[in-house]
Amino acid sequence: MNKHYDVAIIGGGIIGMSIAYHLAKAGKQIVLFEANEIGKQTTSAAAGMLGAHAEGEGDEDIFFQVGRQSQALYEKLTVDLQHESGIDIRISVGGIMKVAFTEQEKRALCRMQHLPTFEWLEASSVKERMPQIADDIVGAGLIEDDVHVEPYAVCRAFWQAAVRHGADVKEFTPVIDVKRGKETLTVSTAKGIFTCDHLTVASGVWSGRFLEELGLSHSLYPVKGECVSVWNNGPALAHTIYHDHCYIVQRDSGKLVIGATMKPNDWQAIPTLGGIEAVIHKASQLMPSIREMPIDQCWAGLRPATSDRHPYIGKHPEDERILFATGHYRNGILLAPITGEIIRGLIVGESVHKEWLHAFRIGRKEALFV
Ligand code: FAD
Ligand code: GLY
């Protein structure tokens, strides 16, 4: 038998690592088990947009409130993580230019016009700011707060800072099984058996089997996303270009990240030629010059989706010792800080918005997303 911990976490993607960081910083004894390498699954596939406006259904949605709060947390985290880990998470300026090609798309976008964080720009103004953009746009909504970060850098920064606060992080240590004793929880891994007072399931799209074993029904499924990156041999993009699930994001290195397909129920995290072709086709309608840019690489990742596209964050309804944080779908990078704060709040006894816990509880009636 190995050491006893306050909290064990299954999964070392950005969600598990944020939870480890927030709890270790609050003085809890933490162990995190990662089956492979930290942050190398879905987290590394992400573009890193903090798309609270761009990815939501409007500002009345709960996603918007939670997303905005998480976006705000990144401001302080950038400084704290740099100090505690020495890693720059490369938060960008410029935000997202959400493009409209038709009057109907313009009307849909302008539903956000009452927000001080949204500015509608006619095509000529967009062109002035971004000469690379396609000629046939009607205009675009500029959302400067929807900045982006480098997802793997954020995950690594959480990791290094969590370790600095005393967390034990065990790579190449898949969790095999969890047993619920009266006094304690027992976690069996490929590298031994551990006990803990609390357990958090944060293993992304692979969380389903643990939820089932713990008696929780869920709708988790993968939505594969394929991406390609190119070397930008023209002027740097001042803003991320975004239209209908397609985006072009400028990295500091000079690369452009171009994404992404949406393939439900595909468990193979490998890009296909057809998928990459579709991404290039859509992106070159937004920015024709990308066709001339040298290819860097292609990749794919599995978004952990639920039927209503909201995550599961909270406690097991019948066993307070078990928590879960998964199903972050297209927005795990955006939502990582707030998820870490919510789970910390539930474990250390801080107050957490009841409305959020209600919206993200497991076992809710999930309206089918269309
Ligand atoms: P993961 O990163 O997959 O981590 C889960 C970890 O659990 C894995 O490392 C896995 O190895 C581990 N694990 C599994 N089983 C076990 C086990 N038995 N024992 C131990 N460990 C285990 N989000 C944004 O906010 N902005 C974006 O711009 C964005 N772009 C995206 C683009 C693409 C193409 C894709 C695919 C996703 C994008 N996302 C984006 C979504 C985001 O990447 C995910 O929501 C997020 O990475 C989920 O993080 P996670 O920690 O839950 O999962
Ligand atoms: N949020 C971007 C994506 O999931 O592709």
Image (cartoon, rainbow, N blue to C red):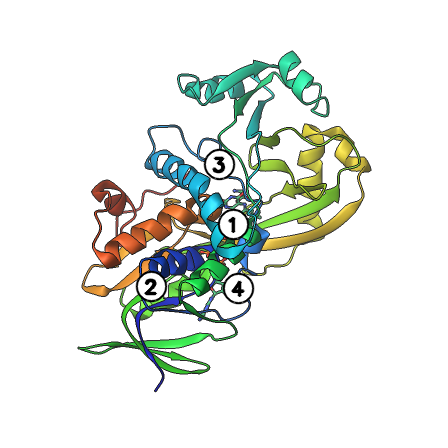
Asked if disc 3 is less than 8 Å from ligand 2, the answer is yes
Question: Crowding at label 3, few (<14), some or many (≥20) Cα neighbours within 10 Å?
Answer: many
Q: Which mark is residue 82?
A: 1
Distance (Cα) linking label 3 and label 2: 26 Å
Respond yes or no on whether mark 1 lies under 8 Å from ligand 1. Answer: no
| Badge 4 or badge 2: first in the primary sequence | 4
- Tell me, for residue 51, which label it has, or none: 3
Q: Where residue 200 is drawn, which disc sits there?
A: 2
Q: CA distance from mark 4 to mark 3?
A: 24 Å
Q: Amino acid at mark 2?
A: Thr
Residue 115 coordinates in the image, percent (x, y):
40, 20
How many circles with numbers are drawn on the protein? 4
Q: Is residue 217 visible?
A: no
Q: Report if the beta carbon of the residue with label 4 is closer than 8 angstroms to ligand 1.
A: yes
Residue 246 vs 321, above or below: the answer is above
Q: Secondary structure at mark 3?
A: loop
Task: Choose mark 2 or mark 1, whichever is in front.
Answer: 1
**Dot 4 crowding, Cα within 10 Å, few <14, some 14–19, many 20+:** many
Q: CA distance from mark 2 to mark 1?
A: 26 Å
Q: Residue at x 34, y 34 (%)?
A: 65
Badge 2: residue crowd in 10 Å (few <14, some 14–19, many ≥20): many
Q: Earlier in the sequence, mark 4 or mark 1?
A: 4
* Location of the N terminus (image quadrant): bottom left
Label 4 element class: loop
Answer few, some or many: residues within 10 Å of disc 1's Cα (few below 14, many 20 plus, some between 14 and 19). some
Q: Indicate the amino acid at tag 3.
A: Gly
Residue tagged 4: 38
Tag 1 near tag 3, CB within 8 Å: no
